[in-house]
Image (cartoon, rainbow, N blue to C red):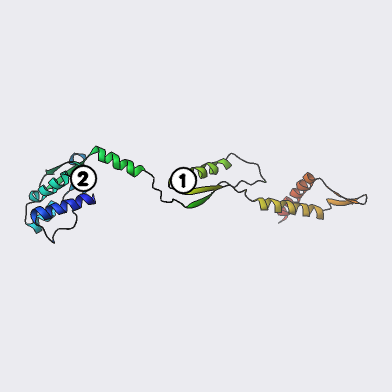
Amino acid sequence: MEDLGKRAAAAVREKLGAGDELPGALEVVRATKPEFGDLQCNAALPLAKPLKKKPREIAQPIADALATHDAVAKTEIAGPGFVNIWLKDEWLAQHAADGLTLRQTGAGQRVVLDYSSPNVAKPMHVAHIRSTIVGDANQADLAGGGLRGRGRQPPGRLGHAVRQADRRVAQMARRRCVREERGQRAVAPVHQVCRRGKGATQGAHARR
């Protein structure tokens, strides 16, 4: 629309001899109603007083200049001096296609996406897949803009699970789950240690 505005201003300056009172580009806006075309240029009305011309006299060179633009199908002067503009369908289709093309704004850049972080010490659940799917979709979107995405799915809270198991073993050791037998040190089975340790931990929390 800026190109149309500059063309309209140049036509008024050339045909009517306008000077400093004329801006570098006349305002071209979207039409308020479909019957008025696709665009409108209403600059002839406010220019009538400084140019000392009738609005339709100013609108005529504007309409003639815009009618020869590659994007314009036709123009018409309506009312006191409104210029209605219709655009070519093929021009609109071409520019609509260009607008839908993804711009490579992130070409050459890299981004890291963290997916779900399931706790490996607990059972997996179908909900863990949700963030993985969302993360993979985000990676595809970023790739459309030229970004190189890299997905990561680190196991969550692994250190916490190890520390918790270590505390349980230490508690059971203090409660004589590890004992001397026949001159050798016999260690209770691991599943018993963890089960007893869990009960001891819960009891300790209950006493707090």
Q: Is residue 149 left or right of residue 73?
A: right
Residue positioned 49% across, 45% down in the render:
139
* Neighbours of disc 2 within 10 Å: few (<14), some (14-19), many (20+): many
Residue 170, numbered label: none
Q: With respect to residue 190, does 17 lie above or below?
A: below
Q: Residue furthest top?
A: 89
In this picture, residue 107 sits left or right of residue 175: left
> Which residue bears the numbered disc 1?
143
What residue is shown with label 2?
A: 39
The furthest residue to the front: 108
Horizontal arrangement in the rendering, residue 113 relative to residue 205 (left or right) = left
Residue 6 in view: yes
Separation of disc 1 and disc 2 at Cα? Answer: 36 Å
Q: Report the amino acid beneath label 2.
A: Leu
What residue type is disc 1 on?
Ala
* Classed neighbour count for the residue bearing mark 1: other residues with Cα under 10 Å, few (<14), some (14–19), many (≥20): some
Front position in the image: 196 or 24: 24
Q: Is residue 27 visible?
A: no
Q: Secondary structure at mark 2?
A: strand
Of labels 1 and 2, the one closer to you: 1
Residue 40, percent across and down?
A: 19, 46
- Give the mark nearer the N terminus: 1 vs 2: 2
* Residue 82 drawn at (x, y percent): 14, 47
Q: Please give the name of the residue rendered at 16% of the width and 44% of the height, measured from the top-left corner.
A: 68
Residue depicted at 46% across the width and 45% down the height: 143
Asked whether the beta carbons under mark 1 and mark 2 sit within 8 Å of each other, the answer is no
Q: Quadrant of the C terminus?
A: bottom right
Query: How far across and down, in percent of the image, does residue 185 sit?
Result: 88, 51
Badge 1 element: helix
